[in-house]
Amino acid sequence: MSTAAPAEQRTAGGATRRRPRSAVVVPLVLLCIAAAVRLWDLGDPDRLFFDEKYYGRDSLDYVTRGVEEERPAHPPLGKWVIALGIQLFGYTPFGWRIGVAVAGSLTVLLVHLSGLRLFRRTGPAALAALLVALDGLAVTTSRIAMLDATLALCVALAFWLVLLDRDARRSARGPAEPLLHSLLGSRYRWLAGVALGLAVATKWSGLLAVAAAGLLVLGTELAGRREGLLRGTRRAAAVGAGAVLSLLLVPAAVYLASFAGWFANYEASYAGAQACEAGDCATGFGDRLDTWWGTQTALVDYHRNLEATHPYRSDPPGWAWLERPVLVYAESCTTEQQEAGECEVPPGTVARITMVGSPALWWPALLAYPVLLWRAVVRRDGVAAAILVPLALLWLPWLAAGKPGYFFYLAPAVPFIALGLVRAIQVGPRPRLVGAGLAVLAIACFAFFAPIWLGIPLDRDALDLRYWLPSWR
């Protein structure tokens, strides 16, 4: 049996036409740009900093003990990503950061693939991916051993799979399609459920993406159908039941499976050790499952009652316009260190890493949000709606939480901010010119802000030039 060459694809009539080289070259170039930015001098700072002090050490426990020694504050998957890097490259700064850097780079690729599904054109898709590749929040969260870049990857993967499911279902839809097809969807819907399970197994905020995926699937299945009330109600019920199976039960199963290391090393876990000290060290699976469920409810109470104070916590309404970024690393030379030759940075300079988004993306996006809303609601623009739903659900619930958080909680929303901005440009005047200008602006912003995103030492005056708002300091 013969197969077509990778650069070729068959048309509906059986003829073969060559796939444009851009289909391979453009995503490869974008991936290389993202990886270069995220891997450059990844071992610096050469020690644990900010929340690496928790996640780096917990991930080392995964390598050496199979489970954390201390009580965990988050599910295990993101820490397993960090642990894989430690296993491959040792307990070094590069080792505990490489897994997250790879996750951040792959997210850029998925933004491009999602853009192709949404926009059907290489240029807009590449622009959205470039904006993510060079965004300050996306870059900084991809260069530190934390969980948010891994969460962003899982959410972006789930979104792309939902788009694949949408296209597969549209191509298979008929005038009298059986309800069973709407219930089951395509295989991509079930794979999206797996990706969503990985997201929740990284941080519980992945549940916001589960809700977004459910709404997108519901809209895909019901939009554009001309069915009577009874038939339409039955189809909606079928879609809802299918969503429960593929987008709730599958993620729940993946979430439970992510704790396999905890179950296998029960006695070494924090909860298991506590149970053993209390004389209730039963090792049956049912007993372990009961203890595991207790850890989940305790985790709910922990996050509900958490009232930690930190100078860089901020109110969610200000996140959209970069009101309060997060300083995660600062280094300068004291006189004593300089005299002793123990400076971490050149004398007279300061090195900082600040989690702040690129003004080339976040501030123009403020103008794009009303356009997206108008296009989705008034013009019934399915592309705008597909972007707006996950963007809104990844941000607005933090407003409802009623308490401050950290700006980097929006890391999973960066792909949708970029896609939304590109969509607004698409439907505006002179989209090619505006898009090209935005690309140049994004590159210029990266060149200017790279020192405070990558921790490059600067003298005090040059550093101050990069903190545009008083609240950034």
Image (cartoon, grey):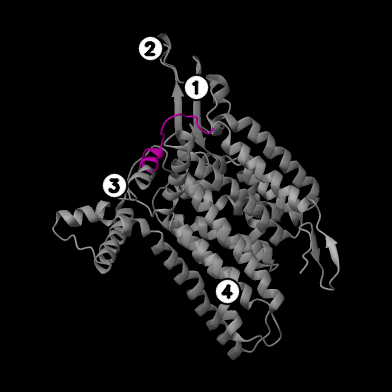
Amino acid type at mark 1: Val
Q: Is residue 324 in view from this perspective?
A: no
Spatial separation of the CA atoms under disc 4 and disc 2: 64 Å
Circle 1 residue? 350
| Mark 2 / mark 1, whichever is N-terminal | 2
Quadrant hosting residue 86: top left
Q: Is residue 58 magenta?
A: no
Circle 2 residue? 336
Q: Secondary structure at mark 4?
A: helix
- Which residue shows up at 41% across the image and 34% down it? 49
Spatial separation of the CA atoms under disc 1 and disc 3: 36 Å
Furthest toward the top, the residue is 339
Circle 4 residue? 218
Q: Secondary structure at mark 2?
A: helix
Spatial separation of the CA atoms under disc 4 and disc 1: 51 Å
Segment colored magenta: 42-57
Circle 3 residue? 69
Q: Is residue 18 above or below residue 356?
A: below
In the picture, which quadrant includes the N terminus?
A: bottom right
The mark closer to the camera, 3 or 4, is: 3
Q: State the residue in front, 355 or 148.
A: 148
